[in-house]
Amino acid sequence: MSVQDISRKYAVTLRGKGGVPIVFAHGLGCDQTMWKDVAPAFEASSQVILFDLIGFGNSDHSCFSYERYQSLADYADDCIELIEHVCSEPVIFVGHSVSAMIGVLAAGKRPDLFRQLVLIGPSPCYVNDGAYQGGFNAADIEGLIEAMRSNYLGWTKGIAPLIMGNPERPELTEVLEESFCRTDPDVAQHFAALTFWSDNRSDLASVTTPALVIQCDPPPLNGSTLKYGFDPEGGPQWQTSDTSPTRSSRSFGRLRFCAAKAWRWRMPFARSAFPS
């Protein structure tokens, strides 16, 4: 496919004055417009790439099928395709919510395409599993998906304030609710099922790309600890941290994290948190 074909497929928007390319990936029920108050801060010194996941926003919806998209790894393949065609050098990938894990999967498969990862509100698994607290039990997720199927508009009105928080700023909830309402309900339900039933804990160890993990306090919809215990038989550990949002890095196996406590959408410090 040509660059033009890829740009149409993913509704790619290119901005900025050059420099290191930064790819921004949106979360469930959103599209690239969610970055409208964030991406401009990076345009003076970087190339900013915005896009819509297939089935969302202005992407080519004819490319979506239930057979083609059966796991988050399929969306990771899309990210790889986009970066291969649009970017001439390794990128900084900024992924929100489920797109954080999509970025992790893509970087694990093609580390040569990724310079760094910025993971906002990630969760490798949403389902409680023994000592691991993903935030939901199986019945919770079944109920959530069923609520989407039975009354999608009602679901959006209930879930938007829970996800957004910030009750003192209802306009933020309205923006998220409107974004959900613009999304095809069938696509949203399918994507939600892929998201909430996914378990990518075992994929973390394959990632060697430096990553900055940003969590809300407390993090909604993904458990209170985000811990996946690291030991010789366990794997990397995810955790929230009370460290300063300037620079803090640890190495958990082969996956290195910069853990930072941050408010939702506060991104400008992320650029300076990486090693040069």
Image (tube, rainbow, N blue to C red):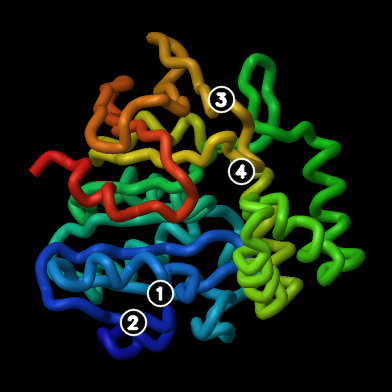
- Which one is nearer the viewer's eye here, 64 or 163? 163
In space, the residues marked 4 and 3 are separated at their CA atoms by 18 Å
Kind of residue at disc 1:
Phe
* Residue position marked by numbered label 1 in the rendering: 51
Q: Nearer the viewer, mark 2 or mark 4?
A: 2
Q: Secondary structure at mark 3?
A: loop
* Residue position marked by numbered label 4 in the rendering: 198
Q: Are marks 1 and 4 in contact (CB under 8 Å)?
A: no
Q: Please state the horizontal and vertical placement of residue 15, each as a whole percent of the image.
A: 25, 80
- The quadrant in which the N terminus is found is bottom left
Specify whether residue 150 is in view: yes
When asked about the image quadrant of residue 220, the answer is: top right
Q: Please state the horizontal and vertical placement of residue 236, each as a whole percent of the image.
A: 40, 23
Residue 13 numbered mark, or none:
2
Q: Is residue 91 left or right of residue 233?
A: left
In space, the residues marked 1 and 2 are separated at their CA atoms by 6 Å
Residue at (30, 20) in percent of width and height? 253
In space, the residues marked 1 and 4 are separated at their CA atoms by 23 Å
Q: Nearer the viewer, mark 4 or mark 3?
A: 3
In space, the residues marked 3 and 1 are separated at their CA atoms by 30 Å
